[in-house]
Amino acid sequence: MNSHYTYLVLDIASVLFPLALSFDKKVAFYKLWKYLFPAMVISGAFFILWDVLFTAQGVWGFNPKYITGINVFNLPIEEVLFFVCVPYSCVFIYEVFNAYVKRDVLGTCGKRISILISIISLIACILFYNKTYTIVNAGICLALVLFVTFPYRFRNLGRFYLAYFVSLIPFLICNGILTALPIVTYNDEENMAIRLFTIPLEDVFYCLSLLLSTVLLMDYFKEKKTNQS
């Protein structure tokens, strides 16, 4: 295989299995597409803008050896597709748990997990206030988690965290490949320089923010439709 297709193949591989199982009768994920796709567009637009700015500022970059050279918004097209494939796959995991795990395993622990994540995010913001990738990641994560826990009171918080912890496995595998080759290169002057193998620790916050924002928007569109019916 031509190495220039590596990132593209990784995008496709990350979404292939969830896409194939979207028509499972019990999950029926395809029925949620009308809510999911607008949510991914809005959430993706924010993260792509973030991506464009960080690429321009040298917070991270892309190895030309592993990309096709086709750019959209001054980003490799593979990077733009990342914000379609990865959220789709992670939200699919969330809906699979909703369909197959009847008991809310984490239940009342949701609020405690939120408080713990908030404390960790706040500490990261304070200790690494001069690191662009760290403070933006931890700050957005902190704001989202506090919002869904207190003023919004997201009713599926426990279920969300269960899906998030499970989705970290494929997310970190995907990011592990991206950073090990490397396809995506990080400027350690702009992050904590703490790695999970080859993955910047901040990516754990990044995954949470990406998944949570998409799930929240999807649920908003779903409830809006229900209220109009």
Image (cartoon, helix red, strand yellow):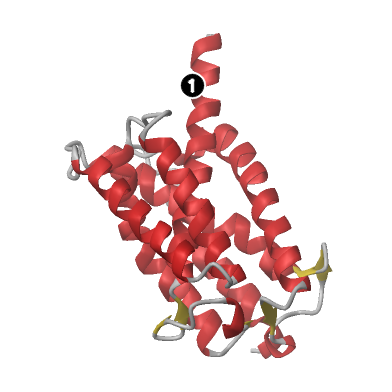
Q: Residue at x 65, y 73 (%)?
A: 8
Considering depth in this image, is 150 or 126 the residue closer to the camera? Answer: 126
The image shows residue 102 at horizontal and vertical percentages of 20, 36
- Say if 193 sits above or below 89 in the image: below
What amino acid does circle 1 point to? Answer: Glu
From the viewer's perspective, tell me whether residue 219 is left or right of residue 78.
left
The image shows residue 164 at horizontal and vertical percentages of 36, 54
Considering depth in this image, is 123 or 71 the residue closer to the camera? Answer: 123
Instruction: Residue under label 1, please give it.
Output: 223
The image shows residue 39 at horizontal and vertical percentages of 59, 39
Q: Residue at x 34, y 55 (%)?
A: 119
- Say if 72 sits above or below 218 in the image: below
Quadrant into which the N terminus falls = bottom right
Residue 87: tell me if it is visible.
yes
From the viewer's perspective, tell me whether residue 121 is left or right of residue 163.
right
Residue 19: tell me if it is visible.
no
The image shows residue 76 at horizontal and vertical percentages of 75, 72
